[in-house]
Amino acid sequence: AQSVTQLGSHVSVSEGALVLLRCNYSSSVPPYLFWYVQYPNQGLQLLLKYTTGATLVKGINGFEAEFKKSETSFHLTKPSAHMSDAAEYFCAVSRGANNLFFGTGTRLTVIP
Amino acid sequence: KAGVTQTPRYLIKTRGQQVTLSCSPISGHRSVSWYQQTPGQGLQFLFEYFSETQRNKGNFPGRFSGRQFSNSRSEMNVSTLELGDSALYLCASSANPSGRDEQYFGPGTRLTVT
């Protein structure tokens, strides 16, 4: 069975501070991993994904994530938070099909 | 390229009624997936269609069904609506069904059941 755990349903950071959103997955086989962002009253937008290859993945808007198989983690980071980063972030996994299993989400608040 | 479109954007129905939601994928995309988003259960996979065939189905009752047409447009239907079916229903399209590629999400249809 696949599952995704996102630690912290709410995270607050100051503008300009490091953003760290945590994601751990449970899978017998390394899955495909994704981070999506959702702004109010909108659908989801892909930030980045890991399928194979380089374990440090760079995405849009300055975000990046590192796949760590030994820790079964795929944490999302951004060196310097911007007000426009305030949104809800979802970690998701899939394994060979377009049926994403999502974490419960982390709402990011950026304090000016 | 136009994005994924979903109609209607908002819908209010009464318990016991049925509803049909529509999704038009990005041109050229043949895989369409549906998800339900609620505050309590989060984002849950409903089903996926590729080339008019259902490939995967989530853990939802038979009241939830879907189909895909030859032009890749998809519809989902919920019969005998319950209050718990109130949710944001998201459709996503992808170029192929491998799971490796990005799924592009539409803005969703917000269904309220009263």
Image (cartoon, coloured by chain):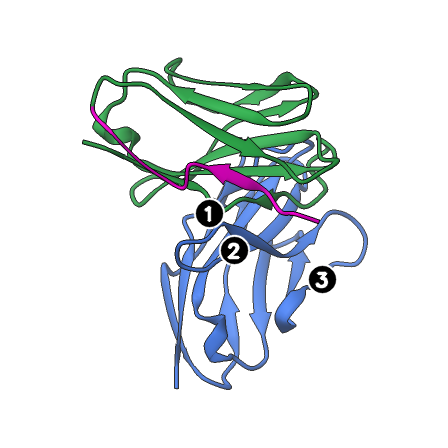
Chain colours: A blue, B green
The part of the chain drawn in magenta is B1-14
Q: Position of residue B42 (x, y in %)?
A: 38, 43
Looking at the rendered structure, whether the residues under marks 2 and 1 are on a common chain is answered as yes
| Numbered disc in front, either 2 or 1 | 1
Q: Is residue A62 left or right of residue B42?
A: right
Q: Residue at x 63, y 33 (%)?
A: A98
The answer to whether residue B21 of the structure is visible from this angle is yes
Q: Position of residue B91 (x, y in %)?
A: 52, 37
User: Do tag 1 and tag 3 residues touch (Cβ < 8 Å)?
Assistant: no
| Numbered disc in front, either 2 or 3 | 3
- The answer for how far apart the CA atoms under marks 2 and 3 are is 14 Å
Looking at the rendered structure, whether the residues under marks 2 and 3 are on a common chain is answered as yes
Q: Which residue is mark 3?
A: A57
Q: Residue at x 74, y 33 (%)?
A: B96
Q: Which residue is mark 2?
A: A23
User: Do tag 2 and tag 1 residues touch (Cβ < 8 Å)?
Assistant: yes
Please state which amino acid type lies under the numbered disc 3. Answer: Val
Q: Total marks drawn?
A: 3
First in residue order: circle 2 vs circle 1: 2
First in residue order: circle 2 vs circle 3: 2
**Vertical relation: B7 (above or below) A58:** above
Q: Which mark is residue A103?
A: 1
Label 1 sits on a secondary structure element that is: loop
